[in-house]
Amino acid sequence: MPAVTRVDPKTIFTPEEWAKVSRQSVWIGPALVVFAWAVIIGAGALFILWPNPLTYIVAVMLIGTRQLGLAILEHEAAHGTLHPNAKLNDWMAEWLCGGPVGGSLKRYRPYHLTHHKYTEQAEDPDLVLSRPFPVTKGSLWRKFVRDLTGQTFFKQRIQPAIEQLKGKKRKPPRVPDNPALRFWIAQAVIFGVTAALGYWWAWLALWIVPMATWFPLVTRLRAMGEHAMVNTQDDPFTHARTTLANPLERLFIAPFWVHYHCEHHCFMYVPCYNLETTHKLLVLKGYGERMRITKGYVEVLKRCGSKVETAQAAA
């Protein structure tokens, strides 16, 4: 199928407006990386200083969401918008963002740009994430249970490694890379630092557990919010959904403006920190009616879990 229709920003924004929203900062991207790690460290310290079930749950949620945040910043780097210096952009993505959570910029970039080129079409490699919806409420909650109990983590991360160790043949990646090396170097650094501080258990309890539970859940919620049930048409403003997340949702589900996904698909080289301004300009110019906008992730859940059970339908 042909590539999806693109938006020419010159037909929407004045030169001054476009210069404002497309301008890359030399310091904001690195600051976001530092902020993500600061929240991870702070959330871990919260539980270490006040160890109880509540602070542990909050720490796992905050760290898991910031692990997603690191993946989002790797996504930003895939578009070349984490830093205007291309080498620094890619280095931060590989070693400070994607690497610690198992990502590979070299493999992700061509995959993701294909997603942008063929959004919600047969050639879209991310179509599998949106195609199943809507599902029943029961199916939706079973997915969440698998995420929170580590089953998704095992299926996506542990099982492939076991099969590889057993010598089962796997299709070689199109782009040569060794993300496992960066991942384990990052794990060694995290474990070494926490052990040196006297908290040897923190790597497992405050890094791996969030990665195995909350991270898969919010990754699923992100995918649902972005493309599930968007009813894609020729209009590029219908290729993705923007979810108007409240402060708690941004804290625990959608960091770094990832919920402005319609704006991102329309103007994929606008840095994430300018997407909110882009959204406001589009609404002021009357494009809000054409966009897929949902008020919060509760509404996303209602839409994605709206399929009626067979027995209920028969009744």
Image (cartoon, rainbow, N blue to C red):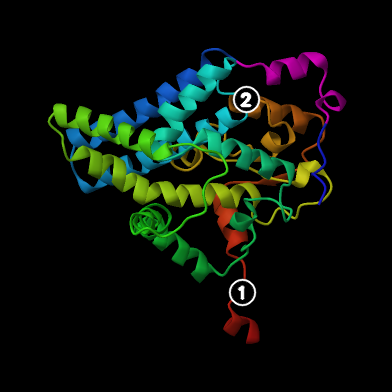
The residue shown at (64%, 50%) is: 125
Number of numbered discs: 2
Where is residue 260 shown, x and y percent of the image?
A: 63, 37
Is residue 159 something that shows in the picture?
yes
Drawn side of residue 121 relative to residue 70, left or right = right
Picture quadrant where residue 44 is located: top left
The residue stretch that appears in magenta: 8-24
- Which residue extends farthest left? 198
Residue 20 within the magenta-colored segment of the rendering = yes
Most foreground residue, 54 or 161: 161
The residue shown at (41%, 58%) is: 152
Where is residue 185 shown, x and y percent of the image?
A: 31, 32
What amino acid is found at the position of numbered circle 2 in the picture? Pro
Badge 2 marks a residue whose secondary structure is loop
Where is residue 65 shown, x and y percent of the image?
A: 42, 40
Residue 14 within the magenta-colored segment of the rendering = yes
Picture quadrant where residue 192 is located: top left
Residue labelled with disc 2: 271
| Mark 1–mark 2 distance (CA, rounded to whole Å) | 39 Å
> Is residue 303 shown above or below 285?
below
What amino acid is found at the position of numbered circle 1 in the picture? Val
Most foreground residue, 10 or 79: 79
The residue shown at (77%, 39%) is: 288
- Which residue extends farthest bottom? 315
Residue labelled with disc 1: 308
